[in-house]
Image: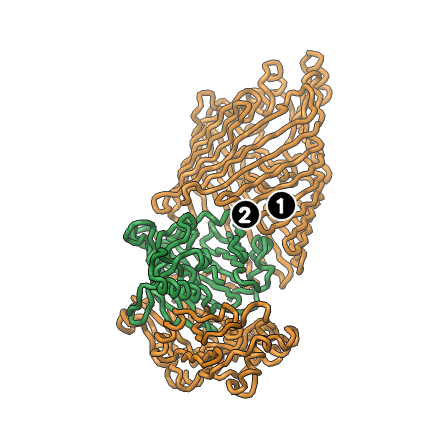
């Protein structure tokens, strides 16, 4: 039961109309209250008394037996069955009138479309549009400027209309607007009235109050006994108002609002500028064989966006990074870099979206290592110290998307290939360690070390970056996507140049050794899905790659083989509280690789535990990645003070360990303790 | 249907119930009242600009601003909710999309702007706190009356108005954080003016209180309410700054596309 409705017993009425004890009890209780509908139980049918705040729409919606009967059909049936209750027209329902429910067989005598058209035609001026609460930093002038129906209306006139329509929002005169009060727009001045009136599903406006209906004006807070709801009668001016404000205030007075103006009030055409992702961090290394003693890192992203008309949007973004290291046997280095972030022009159509410019496009669904994320540019400047999304840079792309119901087709082309962003050549995070003569991914080899130390690095990144398509569906119960891509590995794979390789294979020392970074093209065929079982959310993703770079053990020749990467993960809140955990199992396989220097099979468990504590002033978090078939460990516990939004202070540890040839092993001397600050403005 | 959040918190928190041997009439009436509260007219759609203030017990005050878009489906029980935060900056543009299906299934996605990804999440994490407030995720749920036993305990005068005391206890204790809810239901508006929430034990753990109700476009609207953690003294204040009903929100705002694109819903802001 939506509202008090009483009826006598009758076998054929739908169950929804059946009277309940509470409806009758409520009816009795309500009958003694003024301005409340009187309920009538007729002898042979059901009746409903129109309340002052009812609309024919709301009544019809409430009383129709099922959604098989459209609201408009029900409206027409009520109208035709109760001519006495209307002032001659559909839109002029009388408050206080008694409606008799039409017999069930009369409800659908108008076909739904005709009923809609007729109701639409009858719709007069729209109902008032909403309410606005006055903030302490607002003036009547600023509000009137914002709420007036169009720019042709003088602000002064709108202000006067607001004053007359909302007498209780003022302390007696137009220049004394009360902060915290609510202003309602008079119906005839509702914004967008014409367009809204065209809509078939909008309810008709409230009917005029019956003369005896007591108008309850919302009073200013703090005026009377806090134990009494503050209701007052409308003054004379408001009596002419077709829908005077009604409301209740309970308990203590509302405090004066003390708010900063927010972006929502800025004109829609203005630039939205944000200083994002600010980070300052200092690190101390702890391992005995540490490459450096201390590190410092700072970065910031400046983003600006603005709409260009209804359909277009322009986005601009730049970032700056500062990395420094001192002490230890690695060279002291300080590097400052500026880079582009997302800079694009976007068009939004009804079912399509086109984005041209530099973008970060992250395909895939699982955390940290999504196998189908092959078109983004990796950021290797800090290895894996930052969370996944922060380890990606924008790259030039043309992206076309189509949306249809739950379906999403995503087409991406990368006209210029952008390889992974690397740190300074002598950074402790560079994958070619020329100080100690090591190469990430290969076991340390005393014979190779001097060559690696002397080798020049060459990187040929000309050409396009490929492209791909992803077709996704977000539906009831599960999300899934499939993708086909022709991509290039953004992470460099280092091989010796041909003369060096021949020399090494022959057992001699190359004269002018060089390491060439290659980014082989590969086909990627993959898919991902997410679904929930109970309180757990499962995610799975896999990709087959036609070309994964490897180095043959026999002759150090670089080639490619097929590979498969997969991840299965689960996220949940054990204890049904604020403690969140994700756990993923991942596998990386090289198919028919033969005798290569690279790992042919790797299995990992990765994930995150996170728990706020002390009234959400602090957060403890652990990110981890553990090799399952080889020792390869990364642990990142972090304690953060998060009470002072939008900033946080954190203390973290990056702990690495691993066997020869693993990532954890390669960087294990880089274990460090960090103290940092993050913020967004 | 109202999922509710800022706007109809009190309305959605309505129901619950009683033991089988309880007075049958009181239970029937209780169920009817819970249904009436649940089906309280609230328009076909609404857009709310709300401010959530986390305060009390000497903690550093935090303020969250958001827009909530709500649309009811054609079928009873079907509804969509999209909540997008606009402030503070560290959660700006973060959004949650909830699709309630007839019959009680719920699809829920979170959008995290840093990753630019929509992320399906389970709707059954009821006891977690919603953006660090005193609200549990369960408090955002459009809890249907049949999930609880309801019993009317009587009527009394509360804050100067007539209210009906409604006691609600979950049919399946496993699907609620709360062992009992006691609602002071304002009869004219069908809005509970106070709800005591029990998490086991004889004393309530949390309390919802409504300070301000306003009729907007013919719909009774909770304009200000609080959720108090009675143990810690921490309070979450929910205030409606702007609200508009029945603007014909399009269905496609409530898709993962609408979730991931903050600009899509901007023209519908009040």
> Which one is nearer the viewer's eye here, A536 or B110?
A536
What is the basis of the colouring in this image? by chain
Q: Which chain is green?
A: B
Q: Is residue A8 visible?
A: yes
x and y percentages locating residue B89 in the rendered image: 47, 52
Q: Is residue B184 shown above or below A171?
A: above
Chain A shade in the render:
orange
Of the numbered discs in the image, which one, if any, rests on residue B120? 2
What is the spatial separation of the Cα atoms under label 2 and label 1, in whole angstroms? 11 Å
Question: Label 1 crowding class (10 Å Cα cut-off): few <14, some 14-19, many 20+?
Answer: many
Q: From this viewpoint, is residue A273 visible?
A: no
Q: Residue at x 56, y 45 (%)?
A: A531
Q: Nearer the viewer, residue A634 or A678?
A: A634
**Looking at the rendering, which quadrant does residue A222 occupy?**
bottom left
Q: Which residue position is annotated with label 1?
A: A480
Percent position (x, y) of residue A509?
Answer: 67, 14
For the point 68% across and 53% down, which residue is it? Answer: A402
Left or right: B262 as drawn, with respect to A551: left
Which of the chains bears the disc numbered 2? B
At label 2, counting other C-alpha atoms closer than 10 Å, the crowd grade (few under 14, some 14-19, many 20 or more) is many
Q: Say the numbered circle drawn on residue A559.
A: none
**Where residue B19 sits in the image (x, y, percent)?**
35, 55
């Amino acid at each position: 039961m939506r509202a008090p409705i009483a009826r006598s017993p009758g076998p054929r009425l739908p169950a929804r109309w059946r009277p309940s004890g509470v409806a009758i009890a409520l009816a009795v209780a309500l009958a003694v209250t003024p301005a409340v509908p009187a309920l009538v139980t007729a002898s042979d049918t059901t009746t409903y008394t129109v309340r002052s705040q009812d609309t024919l729409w709301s009544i019809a919606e409430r009383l129709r037996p099922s959604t098989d009967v459209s609201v408009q059909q029900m409206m027409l049936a009520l109208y035709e069955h109760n001519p006495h209750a209307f002032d001659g027209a559909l839109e002029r329902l009388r408050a206080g009138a008694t409606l008799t429910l039409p017999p069930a067989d009369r409800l659908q005598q108008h076909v739904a479309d005709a009923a809609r058209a007729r109701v639409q035609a009858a719709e007069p001026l729209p109902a008032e549009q909403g309410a606005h609460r006055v903030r302490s930093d607002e003036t009547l002038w600023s509000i009137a400027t914002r709420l007036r129906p169009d720019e042709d209306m003088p602000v002064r006139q709108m202000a006067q209309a607001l004053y007359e329509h909302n007498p209780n929002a003022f302390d007696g005169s137009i220049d004394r607007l009360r902060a915290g009060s609510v202003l309602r727009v008079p119906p005839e001045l509702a914004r967008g009235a014409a367009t809204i009136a065209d809509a078939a599903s909008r309810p008709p406006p409230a009917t005029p109050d019956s003369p005896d209906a007591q108008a309850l004006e919302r009073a200013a807070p703090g005026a009377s006994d806090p134990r009494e709801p503050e209701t007052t009668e409308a003054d004379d001016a408001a009596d002419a108002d077709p829908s005077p404000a009604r409301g209740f205030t309970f308990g203590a007075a509302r405090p004066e609002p003390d708010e900063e103006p927010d972006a929502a009030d800025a004109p829609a055409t203005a630039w939205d500028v944000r200083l994002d992702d600010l980070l300052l961090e200092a690190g101390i290394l702890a391992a005995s064989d540490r490459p450096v003693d201390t590190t410092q890192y700072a970065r910031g992203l400046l983003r600006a966006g603005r709409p260009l008309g209804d359909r277009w949007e322009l986005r601009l973004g730049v970032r700056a990074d500062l990395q420094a290291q001192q002490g230890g046997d690695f060279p002291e280095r300080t590097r400052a870099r500026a880079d582009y972030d997302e800079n694009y022009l976007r068009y939004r159509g009804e079912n399509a979206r086109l984005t041209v410019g530099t973008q970060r496009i992250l395909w895939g669904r699982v955390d940290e290592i999504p196998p189908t994320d092959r078109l983004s540019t990796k950021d290797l400047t800090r290895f894996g110290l930052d969370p996944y999304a922060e380890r990606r840079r924008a790259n030039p792309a043309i992206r076309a998307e189509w949306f249809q119901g739950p379906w999403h087709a995503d087409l991406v082309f990368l006209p210029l290939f952008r390889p992974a962003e690397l740190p300074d050549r002598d950074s402790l995070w560079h994958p070619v360690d020329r100080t100690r003569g090591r190469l990430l991914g290969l076991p340390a080899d005393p014979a190779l070390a001097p060559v690696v130390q002397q080798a020049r690095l060459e990187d040929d990144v000309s050409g396009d970056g490929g492209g791909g398509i992803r077709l996704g569906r977000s539906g009831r119960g599960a999300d899934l996507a499939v993708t086909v891509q022709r991509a290039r590995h953004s992470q460099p794979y280092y091989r010796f140049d041909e003369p060096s390789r021949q020399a090494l294979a022959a057992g001699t020392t190359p004269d002018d050794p060089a390491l060439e970074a290659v980014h082989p093209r590969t086909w990627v065929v993959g898919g991902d899905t997410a679904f929930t079982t109970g309180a757990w959310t499962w995610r799975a993703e896999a990709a087959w790659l036609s070309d994964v770079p490897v180095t043959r053990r026999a002759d150090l020749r670089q080639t490619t083989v097929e590979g498969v990467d997969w991840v299965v993960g689960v996220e949940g809140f054990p204890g049904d509280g604020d403690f969140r955990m994700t756990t993923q199992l991942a596998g990386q396989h090289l198919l028919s690789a033969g005798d290569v220097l690279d790992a042919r099979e790797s299995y990992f468990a990765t994930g995150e535990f996170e728990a706020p504590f002390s009234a959400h002033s602090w957060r403890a978090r652990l990110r981890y990645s553990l090799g399952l078939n080889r020792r390869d460990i990364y642990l990142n516990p972090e304690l953060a003070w998060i009470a002072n939004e939008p900033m946080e202070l954190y203390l973290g540890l990056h702990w690495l360990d691993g066997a020869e040839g693993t990532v954890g092993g390669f960087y294990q001397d880089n274990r460090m303790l960090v103290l940092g600050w993050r913020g967004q403005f | 249907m109202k999922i509710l959040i800022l706007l109809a918190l009190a309305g959605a928190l309505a129901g619950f119930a009683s033991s089988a041997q309880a007075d049958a009439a009181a239970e029937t009436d209780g169920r009817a009242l819970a249904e009436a509260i649940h089906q309280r007219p609230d328009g076909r759609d609404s857009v709310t600009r709300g401010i959530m203030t986390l305060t009390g017990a000497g903690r550093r005050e935090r303020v969250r601003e958001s827009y909530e878009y709500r649309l009811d489906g054609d079928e009873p029980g079907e509804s969509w909710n999209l909540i997008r935060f606009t402030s503070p900056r560290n959660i700006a543009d973060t959004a949650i999309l909830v699709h309630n299906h007839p019959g009680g299934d719920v699809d829920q996605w979170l959008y995290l702007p840093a990753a630019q990804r929509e992320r399906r999440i389970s709707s059954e994490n009821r006891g977690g706190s919603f953006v660090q407030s005193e609200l549990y995720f369960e408090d955002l749920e459009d809890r249907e009356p049949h999930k609880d036993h309801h019993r009317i305990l009587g009527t009394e005068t509360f804050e100067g108005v007539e209210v009906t005391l409604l006691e609600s206890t979950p049919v399946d204790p496993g699907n609620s954080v709360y062992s009992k809810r006691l609602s002071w239901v304002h009869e004219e508006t069908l809005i509970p003016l106070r709800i005591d929430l029990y998490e086991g034990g004889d004393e309530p753990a949390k309390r919802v209180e409504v300070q301000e109700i306003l009729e907007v476009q013919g719909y009774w609207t909770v304009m200000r309410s609080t959720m108090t953690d009675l143990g810690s003294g921490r309070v979450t204040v929910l205030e409606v700054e702007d609200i508009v009903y029945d603007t014909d929100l399009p269905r496609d705002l409530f898709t993962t596309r609408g979730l991931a694109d903050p600009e899509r819903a901007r023209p519908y802001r009040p």
